[in-house]
Structure formats: C-alpha cells, structure tokens
Amino acid sequence: MIAVLKPNATKEQREHLISWLERQELEVHISEGKDYTVLGLVGDTSKIDKELLQSLDIVSNVQVVSEPYKKCNRKFHPDDTVIDLGSVKIGGGNFAVIAGPCSIESEEQITYCAQRVKAAGASLLRGGAFKPRTSPYSFQGMRSEGLDLLKLARRATGSPIVTEIMNTEHLPLFENVDLIQVGARNMQNFELLKAVGRQKKPVLLKRGLANTLEEFVMSAEYIMAEGNENVILCERGIRTFETSMRNTLDLAGVVMLHKMTHLPVVVDPSHACGHAWMVPELAKAAVAAGADGLMIEVHNNPAKAKCDGAQSLTPDQFDELMQFIGKEVEFFGKKMN
C-alpha cells in the first residue's frame, strides 16, 4: 500500500501520520520528490482502513500495491534512483560504462586494460577474481590475489572497481571494492543476497540465466529488505531455444524493468551474445532502449584470454565503440559519467 501526501502537508502532520502507521507494526518507506511525498507501507496492511487513510486532510491518494516487490517498486519511489559511487553516478539520467577483462590474469594485464578502458571513456573497471565456471577444470580466477591486483589497477587509474562475489565468506575481502557484483548464477542465492544487503556498498545484481523479470526484481528486493537500497540491475541475456548465441539479450526487459522499478538498469552485451563482433551493435541497441549503463568485456589479447576471450573486445575495438556510444548517450539526453 502507498499513501501520497498533499504538497501542503506540514512536517509535524507527516511525522504524526508516520508514527501512527509504525504503531500498526508497518515499515514506512519515505520517498520525497519535488511536488510530492510517497509513504510506502510494508507489512500486514490489511489492518489499515484504506478509506479512513484516504479521508485524512494531508493524504491525496491511497493505492494498494499488488506486486510482491515493494521497496524497489516504482509505485513506492516514482523518481529514478541514482546510485552514487563517488566520482561516478548511475541512473536518473546518468550513464556509465563498466569495462575490463572477464578475469584478472596478471598485474600487467589488468593495469594495461584499466588504463586503456579509462582513456576510452569507461568510468568503472571490471575484473573477475573469483570465477564461477561451468567446468571444474576451467580457470577459476586468481581469487584474493586477483582482488589485490584489481586494487593496484584502481590505484594506477583512479577508476572505481567492480568484481563478483561468490559466497558470504568472501565478504571481508570485498571491503575495499567499490561495487559488488552478484552474478547470474547467484541471483537466487538468498543468503548471499541478504548478506550483501546488510552491508552498505552498492550492489550490481545480474539477472539469472532463465529467470523472469519478477523473479529478478524480487532478488533485488531481498537486498533492499536488509537495508541496502543501492542496487543496480544488470540484464545480461537469458537462455532461449536459440543456439547460435551464448544467450539472448532481452532488450524488452530493459524497458519493462524501468516501468516496474526505480532502480538503474545496465546491460551486459558481452555475455548476452558470446561473440565479440556482435557486442558493438547490441551495446548501441541497449542505449537506445533506455539502459543506464553498459558492462563490456575488454581484453588486451582475447585469443589468449583464460576466460571468455571470444566475447571480449580488444582495446582498439573498445575505443571505436566508445566514440559512438558517447554521441548516442548525448543524443538520448543522458549524461556520460
């Protein structure tokens, strides 16, 4: 349930109403805009008389929210959420590109990639230290050593870093990571979602390989329900009957997610297709569909990459793509961070 307050409601009146609602054992989520205040009520709202609430002088409108997700529901928070990473903002008209290698392989490799993607216009550096692989015999990442190398690359470039967490035991290792990624395979690892929800660092949540949009948003709700509202959604392609590509990019999902939720939505065209030659066109399409950012894999030598070389752009290819993306973002009225 949500209650929209009238613009002339005084601070005292608002506090009195909120206090009464909280005494009904409801959690009150407050969203303030320029001309409105929305009170989102979470809990057993059946004890609230809708007509009585509607009749109050300071209440403009009362709506019952039927969707199971509440805190990330756009009805609770009509304005776009902006995730602030210090030097970088994502959402609310702010566009950011996250780029770097799928996996960290050496100090020279991650530092070189970091320097090249930053020079091209990427505002955040990605790099995998813990790698969830289909085969137990595939490269699993450099783990904590990889995290240390990623931090060295941040020191060399000043770029905020993004990397994937695999389980709750690794959380202490991520204290100095700027944006924690929860990967597709862990989208419904609810204990991990709750754990990253109890800390305050922003979380990049990737859509699962075969999950509906509602399931995706409900996973974000798990994080937000624990108190961390700094969540970015990432569409990275889903499994379909098509076999010519690694996955199928759901651009319609990007549009729908912006209707369902106020959270920023970024697109990972690299994992969506699995082919480097397709990445530029899918990236351009994602911007046109309203994405708030891109996450692109870039490797200094894709042919010898230990992970996902086939879908990685070279630094030169990334340079060329970013020249177009910068103009496209401006055309659609967003600000490139």
Image (cartoon, grey):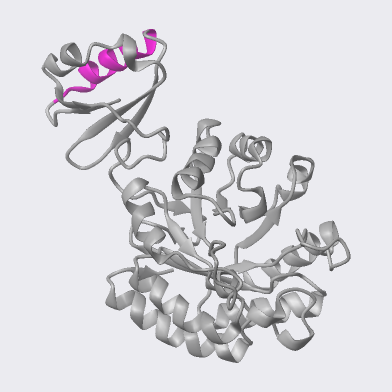
Please indicate, yes or no, whether residue 301 appears anywhere in the rendered image.
no
The magenta stretch spans residue 65 = no
The magenta stretch spans residue 20 = yes
Relative to 197, say whether 19 is above or below.
above
> For the stretch drawn in magenta, what is the main secondary structure?
helix
Residue pictured at 66% horizontal, 48% vertical: 186
Residue pictured at 11% horizontal, 17% vertical: 57
Q: Nearer the viewer, residue 158 or 195?
A: 195
Q: Quadrant of the C terminus?
A: bottom left
Please indicate, yes or no, whether residue 106 appears anywhere in the rendered image.
yes
Q: Nearer the viewer, residue 249 or 103?
A: 249
Find the magenta span and give its range.
Answer: 9-23
- Judged left or right of residue 277, residue 305 is right
Residue pictured at 46% horizontal, 77% vertical: 282
Q: Furthest residue to the front?
A: 241
Residue 52 found in image quarter: top left
**Residue 127 place in picture, x, y as percent:** 69, 67
Q: Quadrant of the N terminus?
A: top left
- Judged left or right of residue 289, residue 266 is right
- Judged left or right of residue 201, residue 288 is left
Relative to 330, say whether 184 is above or below.
above
Relative to 185, say whether 200 is above or below.
above
Residue 63 found in image quarter: top left
**Residue 77 place in picture, x, y as percent:** 32, 40
**Residue 326 place in picture, x, y as percent:** 40, 80
**Residue 292 place in picture, x, y as percent:** 41, 63
Residue pictured at 18% horizontal, 22% vertical: 10
